[in-house]
Amino acid sequence: MTHTDKKFGRYGAYLVLAGGWSVALWALQYAWENIYAIIESYSYYVLGYFAIAGLVSFAVCYYKGPVTDPRSLSLIKWTLQLAALTLVYFGTQLTVVSVATIIVMVTISHFPTNCFQSFLIYWRRRFPPKLRRLTEDEYMMQGCEETRRALSQLKDYCHSPQCDTWHTVSRLKSPHRFAEWVEGNSPHVSDDEIRKHERNAAPPLPMDFTDDESDNDFSWT
């Protein structure tokens, strides 16, 4: 093969490539300009095309296995992101709202995470949330709820394979009573223990004072 033949073959390949891309771009432009008419007139063909393409793609992916190449994963991610942005753009009738939403989404996705966390920390320090003291009823309810949750977790742990039964039993004062409680045959405290706790419990501190009262009113005698 002479140099002229090689040169002509290379130019021919370029011409075919340019012509193929031109035809493809023309077809895409024609389909985009008449997409609503095509979907309305050939709805069954469009649905059939997407169904067949989806099934073939699923079969190929299932046969070849999951994609592991980083570049292929990046292409898939960018394609899905572009499709999502397209749906967001055409999701509303107000173009300004769609464009603003897309700008916010792209900005947040490319915003450094460390800067965002630093901003949140600064905001919480600058404007800390207002703390509210629990009332006595809320305190009692929260205590009962936390106790119930802790006892339930303890039962689950005792029934799990991670529990060393003999080591646990060796550290108990009443293994038989503990076993009955784990099996649900007895409460975790007896009536006598409840009465003893209520009898020996310290009375609550007085909280019915105002901010105007001085610290001298509460000095030790």
Image: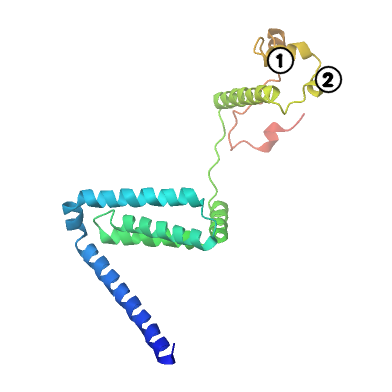
Picture quadrant where residue 161 is located: top right
The reply to whether residue 188 is visible in this rendering is no
Helix or strand or loop: what does disc 2 sit on?
helix
Indicate the position of residue 119 as horizontal and vertical percent values. 54, 58
Indicate the position of residue 59 as horizontal and vertical percent values. 43, 48
Q: Callout 2: 10 Å neighbours few (<14), some, many (20+)?
A: few
Indicate the position of residue 138 as horizontal and vertical percent values. 55, 26
Q: Amino acid at mark 2?
A: Ser
Q: Which residue matches tag 2?
A: 170
User: Nearer the N terminus, badge 2 or badge 1?
Assistant: 2
Residue displayed at 62% across by 35% down: 213
Q: Amino acid at mark 1?
A: His
Q: Quadrant of the C terminus?
A: top right
Q: Which residue matches tag 1?
A: 197
Picture quadrant where residue 126 is located: bottom right
Q: Nearer the viewer, mark 2 or mark 1?
A: 2
Residue 52 relative to residue 218: left or right: left
